[in-house]
Image (cartoon, grey):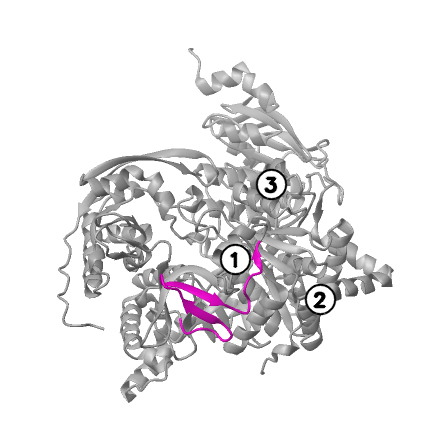
Amino acid sequence: MRAPGGSEVAVGDVLLAVEGVSLSFGGVNAVSDVSFDIRKGEIRAIIGPNGAGKTSMLNVINGFYQPQQGRITFKGETRSKMRPYEAAHGGIARTFQNVALFRGMTALDNIMAGRSLKMNKGFVWQLLRYGPAMNEEIAHRRRVEEIIDFLKIQEIRRTPVGRLPYGLQKRVELGRALAMEPELLLLDEPMAGMNIEEKEDMSRFVLDVNDHYGTTIALIEHDMGVVMDLSDRVVVLDHGIKIADGTPDEVKGNQAVIDAYLGVAH
Amino acid sequence: MAIDLAAHPDTFPKLLIRNANLYGSRPAMRHKDLGIWQTWTWAQVLEIVRAYAVGLSRLGLKRGETIAIVGGNRPKLYWSVTAAQMLGAVPVPVYADAVADELSFVLAHAETRFAAVEDQEQVDKIMSVMDRLPKLEEMVYDEKRGLRDYDHSHLHPMDEIIEDGRKALRQDPSVAAWLDAEIAAGKGSDPSIILYTSGTTGASKGVVLTGERSIKAAADTVAFDHLTENDVALAYLPLAWVGDHYLNYAQGLVAGFCTACPESTDTAMADLREIGPTFYFAPPRTLEVLLTRVMIRMEDAGFLKRKMFHYFIGVARRYGERILNGQPVPLIGRLLYWLGNILIYGPLKNVLGFSRVRVAYTAGEAIGPDLFAFYRSIGLNLKQLYGQTEAFLYVTAQPDGEIYSDTVGPVCPNVDLRIAENGEVLFKSPGMFAGYFKDDAKTAEVMTPDGYVKTGDAGYIDEKTGHLKIIDRAKDVGKLNDGTLFPPKYIENKLKFYPNIREAVAYGDKRDFVAVMINIDLTAVGSWAERNNVVYGSYQELAGHPQVYDMIEKHVAEVNRSLAQDKVMAGAQIRRFLILHKELDADDGELTRTQKVRRGFIAERYAPLVKALYDGSTEADISTEVTFEDGRKGVIKARVKIHDMKTEPVPAALGKAA
C-alpha cells in the first residue's frame, strides 16, 4: 500500500495466496490443484479459454464456492475455506460478469449499499436516522460522493440503474465495490460487451483505482489487448489446470498458452 | 436599488473589494462539489483572490503579462481571472473544447508565459503543443486527479499557490500593503481581458477590453434589467465566450449577484433546476434542444397527461404571450391560463429550472418564431438582444413588454447606432473594445473615421417598431446574376426553423439562382423514421432516403412560398437542393466553435457538390476527410442526389407596396 502522500504503489508482499485448490461439481472438475499468489498493489489477470475455471476461481477466492481441497492465505491468515462475509469483512470486493445491481434503485443508492458493511449503527438506529446514525450516514455519503466524482458519474446520480446503458451500469457496479474500500478488488470481465470507447474508459478507471486508492486488483478478461496493457502478472487456466503464470510477455510466448487458445492436433 | 454609475470603481479587482464591503456576507459564487452546493461569500472570495494573486506574483506573474485561462465554468478559473487582474496581468480565456491547434494559436499569439487550467485533459493538451509555445513557463491547475505523477517543476496545483500566497500575507504585513498598491495602480484604461473571437471569418482575433469601459457597459444593462445582489445566474456557457464574461463575470461583479457553477457540463440541466436562477441566457440552439426533449418525453407520457399538455399548450399559444405583454385578454382566457399555469406551465418551468427566472435572453443567431413564442407563452420572460464581442456586449436589447420574434430590440442606453449606406450596422457603445491584440491594421479596418465600429452585419431599423432587424452578415449579402438581393443566412434560417433541418448552407452570390445544401437533424428525422417504419443503418443512409428527400422538399417548397411573399426576396427562391451525407462539424472546421456555418470553407470542401448544384446533374460523388472525436482521421464517400424545385410565381406588384 502507498504511504500517505507517497507516490509509488509498492508491489511486494503477498496479499493472497492460493495453494493446491481443487473444486468439483459432482464429476466435473472445475479447478484442479491450482496455486498462485496475488501481491499487494499489483493488477493480476486470470485468463483462459471458455470453461477454464476462471470465474470458479474468483468465486473460491471470495468464498462463494467452498473448495474440496487446498488452502487460501489472505493477509497472513490461512483457512481451508472462506465464507463470503468473511471475505467482505476482510477487504475483498467484487463485480460480477452479469451486472448484479439493484435495478430499481438509483446509482447513488446502489453505491451507498456498498457501504452497509461499514455502518456501525444497528438496524433500529438506521431506521430512526437520527443523531449518531445521521452523522454516520453523512460521513458515508461523503465517501460515496467521492467515488461518484472519481468515476465521473455525477449526471446519473439520481437515475435508476435499470434505465442506464450497460457501460454505465458496469461503472456503477465498480463504484459499489469501491465503496467497500477493499484491499483486494475482484473484477469478473469488467469490459465484456463494451465498445472500444467504453473499454478505454473502463481501463482508465481500473488503472486509476490501482493508482489512486492503491487497491490490489484481480481481473478476468477476454480482451487480450486489455489484459496485456493493464496487468502486471497473468495466470492462465485451461480446463481447471494452471498452465502458465508470469508477466504478460512471458505468457504471450508460452507454447502451452498458445496451444490452449488456438488448439492443437491430438 | 438605483445603480449610481459614478459609484462604480474602474477595475474589476476594485469592484470585488467594493462588493466585499457592501455585500460581504452575501453569496458571490456557488459550485456543486461532491453532490453539495458549496458557497463562497464576497468577503471569502476577496480573501481567496488576494491570496491567489500574491501566490501568482511569487510564481513570477507581472503587470502587463498575459495568462491563459483554459477550462470550464469553475470558481477557481473565475478567480484566476480576477487574481491576474489584481496584478495588472491580462487574462486570456480559451475555450475548453478547443483542439490543440486552436489552443496553441491563441497561446502563441497572446504570448502567455502562464496558464491556469482546469484539469489533466487541458494540461495534456498544452503539453502536446509545448514546442510551439516557447514563452510558456508555468502552469497551475485546479483538478488534481491523474496529475500526481507529472513533473511538477513547472506545474502547480492552484490550492498550493493560494496557500503559498496566504502564508506570505500572514507572515509579512508589507505584502498586503504591496498588493493594495498593485490593485490601486490598476487603471480603468488598462487592458482588462483579451477575448479571442470564435473565428466565423478566418483566424480568431484577440479583442482587448478595458476595465472602465466593461464596467460602464455592464452598469447600463444591470440598470436596464433591474439586476440586484439578490439575483442568481448559472454559468454554464463557455468561460472564454464574451457572453459568459459579460453576463456572469462583469454583470455579477457590478450588480453583486451570485454566480453558480455547475457540477460538470453534463449536469448543467439538473443544476439549473436546483439553483433556480433569476437571470438566464441561452442560445437559440439550447432552447431548441430543451423543447425537443420536452416534446419527446411528452410523447411517452400517459394518455391523460399528453392530452392535458397539448390542450393547455394550445391555451398558452392563444393567450400566453398577450398576458405576458400586458395586452387585453378575455376573462375565459385568463381563467384557462391560470388553470394551465397550475397544471402544466408551472410544473414544466420547474422541471426546466425556469421557475424563478425574471429576465431571460437569447442571442447569437436568429430564433424560430414558434420556438420563441413557445417559451414566452408559458410565461418565461424571454427577450432578444444583439451584441458583439467588440461592443462588450449589448448593442440593442428588447425591453420588457416590447417583444417581437424577428427583431433584436431598440438601441441600448448610451449606445449610438447608425446604418451605413450598404446596410451595415455601425455602433458606438460604452463597452467598446480598445483594439485587436497586436493587430492595428485589423482594428483600423473595422473602425470608421468618426469612431464607429463596423459590425459586419447587415440590418435595418424596422419602421413599425423602431427595433433593429438583422438580416445577414454584410459581406455575405450578395446578388444573383439578375441583380436580386441574396442574404444567405436569411434563407438558411427560414429552413432551419423546421425541426427536421439542422443546418442549411445557401449559395447564390454571382450565380443564376439559389441552391442549398441541407443537413437533416438526426433526432427529429430519426424519430420520424421510427414512427413511419423507415429502416436505415446510418446517418448517411437516412440522409439519402427518398422519403426523407420528399419530406425536406415539402419544407423547401414552404420556404419558397414565404420568400415569394416578400417582393425583395421573391427572386431568391430555392431552385435546387441536396441533403448532405454527413453532419457538419466544428472538428472538421465546417462550423465555428459557436456552431455557425463557414460557408466559404464548405464550398471548397464540397466543391463537386456545389458544381453539381449548378450544372444540372441529378447526382454527384463526394469523398471527404473527417476527424473523429479522438483526433484520428478517416474518409467518408457518398453519392448525393440533387432535387429540383418549382418556384412560386412572384406576386404582381400592386401599385407601390410599402
Residue A183, visible in the rendered structure = no
Q: Residue at x 78, y 52 (%)?
A: B58
What amino acid does circle 1 point to?
Answer: Trp
Q: Which residue is mark 2?
A: B46
* Chain where mark 2 sits: B
Q: Which mark is residue B124?
A: 3
Q: CA distance from mark 3 to mark 1?
A: 22 Å
Residue B396: x percent and y percent?
44, 70
Residue B489: x percent and y percent?
33, 56
Q: Residue at x 38, y 78 (%)?
A: B402
SS for dot 1: loop
Q: Which mark is residue B241?
A: 1
Q: Are marks 3 and 2 on the same chain?
A: yes
Query: Of label 3 and label 1, which has the lower sequence position?
Result: 3
Rendered view: B91 above or below A94 = below
Residue at the limit of the structure toward the front, as seen here? B449
